[in-house]
Amino acid sequence: MGYVERVLQPGETIRHASRIHWVVYLPGLLLCLIALIGLGYGAKNGPIAAIFVFFAIVGGAGLVSLASAWFRRWTTEIAVTDRRVIYKRGFIRRHTIEMNMDKVESVDVDQTILGRILDYGTITVRGTGAGLEPLPRIDSPIELRNSVTAR
């Protein structure tokens, strides 16, 4: 059971649940691909120690980036209920933001061209007096916005 399910009030239902988009894996995948190509080229043309070490470090950085992206995606929860918007990130050190639906003034969606193609974007929920911090690389941001604005 996730954080959102544990903090639901009696009678409160989830309208929409979202997560960070899979595009967060792209930098790590790109680094791993560069490392594989470089190591393959080095193995084919004679192993040069400096090139091997360089591409091994690039591959290691790619694996660390992939693990970090997976952990960030796994520990982030975003939900819209019939009463509030809930955002939670973190595992041991948890950061949560909740905003009552009565306090929501607007929901901004920012999408790049790649974001439009792959259906991800940055959501900013603005409320009376304050707002949620921008939530980057959210999967299906238009659906999330529609869940907040449709009452």
Image (cartoon, helix red, strand yellow):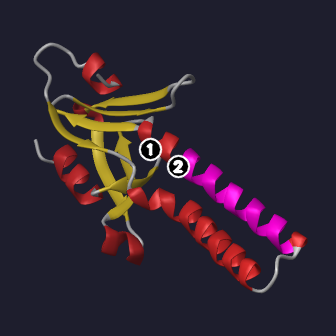
Q: Main secondary structure of the magenta part?
A: helix
Tell me the kind of residue under disc 2: Ala
What residue would you read off at disc 1?
A: 73
- 116 and 41: which one is in front? 41
Q: For residue 7: magenta?
A: no
Count residues near mark 1 (Cα–Cα under 10 Å), then give few for <14, some for 14-19, many for 20+. Answer: some
Q: Quadrant of residue 76?
A: top left
Residue at 33% in and 39% down: 78
The quarter of the rendered structure image containing the N terminus is top left
What residue would you read off at disc 2?
A: 69
Note whether 146 is above or below 86 in the view shown: below
Note whether 44 is above or below 56 in the view shown: below
- 42 and 20: which one is in front? 42
Residue at 29% in and 18% down: 7
Q: Quadrant of residue 129?
A: top left
Residue 131 seen anywhere in this rendered image of the structure = no
Q: Which residues are magenta?
A: 51-69
Residue 43 seen anywhere in this rendered image of the structure = yes
Note whether 45 is above or below 59 in the view shown: below
- Which element carries disc 2, helix, strand or loop? helix
Which of the labelled discs sits on residue 51, or is there none?
none
Q: Position of residue 38 (x, y in %)?
A: 70, 77
Q: Position of residue 131 (x, y in %)?
A: 42, 40
- Mark 1–mark 2 distance (CA, rounded to whole Å): 6 Å
Tell me the kind of residue under disc 1: Arg
